[in-house]
């Protein structure tokens, strides 16, 4: 009955819509005249007007509608500029156009602005065959908008070509569907993955859709966890959570400053005392992100004054030029200054600052180190009077020691905190200073393969880190945060059980996912096997 009802409903809807005449298209621009009219041109890339007729031929384009096209390829790929439309009202469901040229996010693109904010963006396909694109603008019906053609690239494919821009109720190509987002075949259900960025054509054309890698800038502020991660080195993707289990992915926090300048791995801090002077309101401390450019020596900052929703690059970047990368920054209360740890030439270097802008190398490097440091203090067995500093390398290997604000003295060998090659670029939330005192770790779970999926790579489940005494000295322990219990549906317990040889305890409940906690004593020479869906663990 349910299937039959659904089928009839679909037929009824189809029958109704087929008899309704779509409203006439509204031409925003067809670029068939010698000038751009009321469009505002900046720079020289787009010339004095559209390429028309015989002017199109030398540009070797295909897919142009009519005789003219807006092109930034007049004098090759070197010139830069922008072309901005006058305001227009969104009076149809879709905006359709054809686009070609470079596929560089932010740098060769056409943007749709509503209330001055970019809400849609498309790039070329790295081809001068113009492809049709349609944006669903239902959410912005009745609002005023502008279009902006951008060419900020100067190298190969440093141009953009756009034509035949229409408001229409009958798009030439339907937008990529947004459903069933997060319910795809291989989508992890408890590990964070990036959404498919092609769903609304907002900055498409990444090297791989939905990609993420190194974890960055983990920060807890005002009741909200902020998780940042690399999308290659083009931008920092950004997600927020109230409970560490349910995440909302926002738009990327910020992009690279210019094409291929990069925003590599780094850190976020809350500058509570506004020592940087980045906030005009002392009651509104800035959230400050530190990162490195692609040259691995220039280091900049970006900052937010609205809980990470919008960001600005510091206008005097770089704040530091030093042949290193992956800055880890934190406030050291006993010393009363900021500390930065950076990686370069197989060493971690320590720098200090009073204002987050000006930094001094204390020249006490740590050898045998590699990439993406994480560095923090933990009490042993929960006793604050007895603590050690923990230095974690990119691959999760860690050492323990003491830190006086300028020098870390290692007291142990390097210990592994995970098994296998898939745990990388680990970072922690600094709840010790900003939240409930916990040190919570995430890592890039790299190397996964997800055939034909719109996402790529995932983040480990948040884990609580503690230092505990062992016969061999203090060691780092890791376990899922208590919030995992909010995902539990049913619980099954076995207490004080003794298993005979070859005895099996079957799980009574069938589920797509299990959270198993074991406290067992396995006699020497014996083996305990967990068989999960036929896979022995």
Image (cartoon, helix red, strand yellow):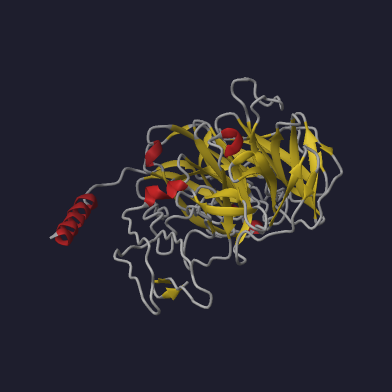
Q: Percent from the top left, x then y, of residue 116?
A: 53, 32
Q: Could you tell whether 249 is left or right of 19 in the image?
A: right
Q: Nearer the viewer, residue 310 or 225?
A: 225
Closer to us: 488 or 115: 488
Indicate the position of residue 471 as horizontal and vertical percent values: 64, 58
Of residue 99 and residue 409, the one placed in the foreground of this image is 409
Residue 461: x and y, percent? 50, 53
Quarter location, residue 507: bottom left
Residue 325 in the figure: left or right of residue 28? right
Give the tally of numbered discs. 0
Does residue 36 show up? no
Q: Is residue 98 left or right of residue 267?
A: left
Q: Quadrant of the N terminus?
A: bottom left
320 shown above or below 53: above
Residue visible at 65% across and 47% down in the picture: 72
Looking at the image, which is closer to me, 492 or 150?
492
């Amino acid at each position: 009955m349910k299937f039959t009802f659904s089928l009839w409903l679909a037929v009824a809807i189809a029958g109704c819509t087929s008899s309704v005449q779509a409203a006439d298209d509204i031409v925003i621009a067809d670029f068939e005249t010698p000038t751009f009219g009321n469009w505002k041109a900046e720079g020289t890339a787009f010339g004095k007007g559209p390429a028309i007729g015989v002017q199109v031929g030398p540009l070797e384009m295909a897919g142009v509608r009519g005789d003219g096209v807006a092109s930034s390829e007049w004098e090759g790929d070197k010139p830069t500029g922008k072309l901005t439309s006058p305001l227009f009202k969104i009076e149809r469901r879709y905006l359709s156009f054809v686009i070609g040229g470079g596929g560089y996010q932010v740098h060769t693109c056409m943007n749709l602005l509503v209330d001055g904010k970019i809400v849609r963006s498309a790039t070329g396909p790295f081809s001068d065959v113009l492809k049709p694109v349609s944006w669903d603008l239902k959410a912005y019906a009745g609002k005023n908008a502008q279009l902006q053609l951008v060419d900020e690239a100067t190298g190969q494919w440093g141009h953009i070509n756009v034509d035949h821009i229409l408001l229409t109720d009958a798009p030439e190509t339907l937008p990529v569907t947004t459903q069933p987002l997060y319910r795809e075949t291989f989508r992890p259900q408890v590990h964070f993955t990036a959404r498919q960025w092609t769903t609304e054509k907002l900055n498409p054309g990444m090297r791989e859709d939905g990609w993420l890698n190194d974890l960055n800038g983990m920060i807890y502020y005002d009741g909200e966890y902020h998780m940042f991660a690399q999308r290659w080195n083009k931008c920092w993707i950004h997600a927020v959570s109230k409970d560490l289990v349910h995440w909302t992915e926002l738009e990327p926090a910020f992009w690279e400053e210019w094409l291929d300048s990069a925003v590599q791995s780094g850190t976020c801090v809350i500058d509570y005392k506004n020592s940087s002077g980045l906030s005009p309101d002392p009651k509104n401390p800035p959230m400050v992100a530190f990162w490195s450019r692609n040259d691995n020596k220039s280091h900049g900052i970006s900052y937010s004054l609205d809980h990470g929703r919008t960001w600005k690059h510091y206008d005097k970047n770089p704040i530091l030029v030093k042949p290193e990368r992956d800055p880890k920054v934190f406030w050291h209360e006993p010393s009363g200054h900021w500390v930065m740890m950076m990686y370069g030439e197989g060493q971690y270097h320590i720098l200090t600052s009073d204002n987050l802008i000006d930094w001094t190398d204390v020249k006490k490097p740590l050898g045998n180190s590699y990439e993406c440091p994480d560095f923090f203090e933990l009490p042993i067995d929960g006793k604050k009077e007895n603590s050690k500093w923990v230095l974690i390398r990119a691959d999760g290997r860690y050492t323990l020691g003491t830190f006086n604000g300028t020098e870390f003295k290692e007291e142990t060998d390097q210990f592994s905190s995970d098994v296998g090659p898939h745990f990388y670029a680990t970072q922690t939330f600094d709840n010790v200073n900003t939240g409930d005192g916990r040190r919570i770790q995430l890592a890039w779970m790299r190397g996964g393969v997800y055939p034909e999926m719109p996402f790529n790579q995932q983040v480990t489940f948040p884990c609580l880190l503690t230092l505990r005494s062992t016969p061999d000295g203090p060691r780092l322990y890791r376990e899922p945060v208590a919030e995992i219990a909010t995902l539990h549906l049913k619980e099954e317990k076995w207490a004080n059980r003794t298993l005979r040889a070859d005895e099996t305890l079957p799980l009574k409940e069938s589920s797509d996912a299990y959270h198993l906690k074991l406290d067992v004593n396995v006699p020497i020479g014996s083996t305990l096997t967990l068989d999960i869906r036929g896979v022995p663990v």
